[in-house]
Amino acid sequence: MERLERFAALLLDENRRQNLISKPSEAQLWQRHIADSAQLLEYVPRETSPPGPWLDLGTGAGFPGLVIAALRPDWEVVLIESRARRIEFLANCVRELGVARCRVIGERLERVEPFPAWVISARAFAPLEKLLSLSAPFSTKATRYVLPKGRSAAHELKQAKKPIRELFHVEHSLTDRDAGIIVSA
C-alpha cells in the first residue's frame, strides 16, 4: 500500500505539469485507475517465479504496468512508452517506488527488440486487432493477454475475426460494471 500511496502522490503532483489523467478523474484515482489496474492480477496465474516479464504497452501514466510492479515487486515488469515526458515520469516513479525489477523502455513498440512476454497488458493503446498484430513478436503460446477495454470490450471482440474471438473472452470489470477486460483463454 505504501508504494501505491507514493505512486498516487507522484502522479497527482506530475499531473499539474503534464496531462497524465483527466482533472475530473483525479478525485476517483484509486477506483478508476489504481484498482482498475490492480484487478488484472485476478486473470493471471499466481506464479511465484513467472517464466518471463509482464509487458505493458503504451503505459502512459503507469496504468496498469506500474501498479502491477508496485503490487508485485518480485515480478519483472516492462513498461513501453514512447512519449518523452511520460518516460521521464515513469523512470522517476520506478526509482521512487523502489521497484528494481521494473524497467521503462522509451521507444515505439515497433522498434523494441522482441522478447517472450509472460503477460501482455494494454490500456487505451490500440484497437484489439492492431494491438494483437503489434504485440505478436512478444507473444508465445503461453502468453496471457489482459486488456482493459472499458465499455468497448464486448464490441471490439465481437468485431474481431473468428480465430481471435475463439482465443479471447470478456470478463466484467470489478471497478465499473459497464466495462470489460479482454482476456486470452
Image (cartoon, rainbow, N blue to C red):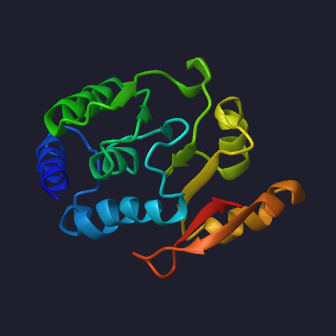
* Residue located farthest toward the right when viewing the structure as drawn: 162
Spot occupied by residue 156 in the image (x, y as percentages of width and height): 70, 62
Residue at the (88%, 59%) spot, across then down: 162
Task: Relative to 86, say whether 6 is above or below.
Answer: below
Residue at the (58%, 36%) spot, across then down: 117
The one of 35 and 1 positioned closer to us in this rendering: 1
Residue at the (27%, 47%) spot, across then down: 70
**Left or right position of 144 against 107:** right
**Left or right position of 42 against 183:** left
**Left or right position of 119 against 159:** left
Instruction: Write down the quadrant of residue 158 in the picture.
Output: bottom right
Q: Quadrant of the C terminus?
A: bottom right
Spot occupied by residue 130 in the image (x, y as percentages of width and height): 70, 42
The one of 157 and 185 positioned closer to us in this rendering: 185
Spot occupied by residue 31 in the image (x, y as percentages of width and height): 29, 70
Task: Relative to 109, say whether 51 is above or below.
Answer: below
Residue at the (37%, 27%) spot, across then down: 104
